[in-house]
Amino acid sequence: MPETILHHYSLSTFSEKVRVALGLKGLAWRSVDIPAAPPRPLLAPLTGGYRRVPVLQVGADIYCDTNLILPTLERLFPPPQAPSFYPSGSEGIARGLSFAWDRAMWIPTIGVLAHFIGDNFPPEFVKDRKEGYLGIDISKSAMAPELPMHLQQLHAQNAWLKTALADGRRFLFGDAPSALDLTCYQTLCLLRKNCPPEVDALAGLVPLLPWYDRVTALGHGKPEAMTEQAAFDAACEAQPVAPTHLQADGDPDGLRAGTSVTITPDDNARVPVSGTLVAASDSEIVIHSRDSRAGDLHIHFPRLGFAVVAA
């Protein structure tokens, strides 16, 4: 199998979810450090223009969004080869609650982060997030009026997490960490790694710290730096793999293999990606794209959070 390549940057909370996932699996992987904001001239051709981070690359197969990247790593490195993200039959619950947590926690977490370090955000980063990604101004001054509401939202979400862990269990589903632990951890990690210590009390994180430390201890696996050019070359030299885990005509809404489609995030960074449907299920869709430089690619998306329409 080709190398596992992750395109990411250090501040990205969603990238942290995948980095710790690679640690839980104990995997060796290639680390491509990319800019926090476009342009990304060697990544954009691989994703068909999809602009969110992280992106997982395996040869000429490109996987977008953590809600697909984690199930993909589970499929490529299943137990007993590597620890599972879904102990005790938890996959359905873990995937559903992970999606809900990401949607609920993203903006309030950014709001609290901006309270502490928003003055340090580069102007071009703030401009990009307003005009090309979130659609809101994430500067400290713009976010300040919403701080009380953002803290309310964090406290309310953290409340159920505290309740779930109150019986002394090590992780949310028992003794083994899960994808849901990694999802909940990522937003707390963004705050604790980038804000002063008082964020723990302000955001109500103190009771969660023993659990937080256990997730942190999973590490990031065995990363090895890789240049953007080397990752691009790896895609050029590979051919996409037939997605035998999916059916060619398995789209639940009746789209057939060979149909031209566009796939667009339904919340933010709504850049449509165009291609030809290869295979699909109710949880994943794969399209073929041919780039003039990178050649043939398969780009994979989750169904949760994305709109798929015939072109």
Image (cartoon, grey):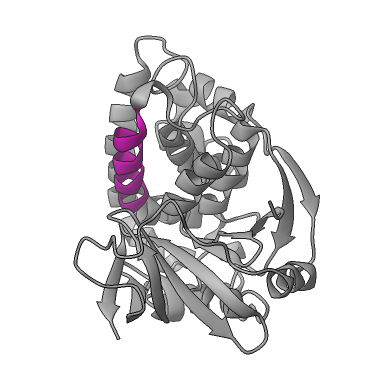
Above or below residue 55? Residue 221 is above
Say if 80 sits above or below 115 in the image: above
Residue 11 image offset from top left, x and y in percent: 61, 55
* Residue in view at x 50 percent, y 51 percent: 69
Q: Nearer the viewer, residue 168 or 225?
A: 225
* Quadrant of residue 238 within the rendered picture: bottom right
User: At 58% across and 38% down in the image, what residue appears?
Assistant: 77
Q: Main secondary structure of the magenta part?
A: helix
207, 40: nearer the viewer:
40
Viewer-closest of 207 and 220: 220
| Residue 90 in view | yes
Residue lying farthest to the bottom in this orientation: 292
Magenta stretch: give its range. Answer: 90-104
When asked about the image quadrant of residue 215, the answer is top right
Q: Nearer the viewer, residue 200 or 225?
A: 225
Q: Reply above or below: 296 against 27.
A: below
Residue 283: percent from left, percent from top: 32, 53
The location of residue 192, given as percent across then percent down, is 56, 39
Residue 94 counted in the magenta span: yes
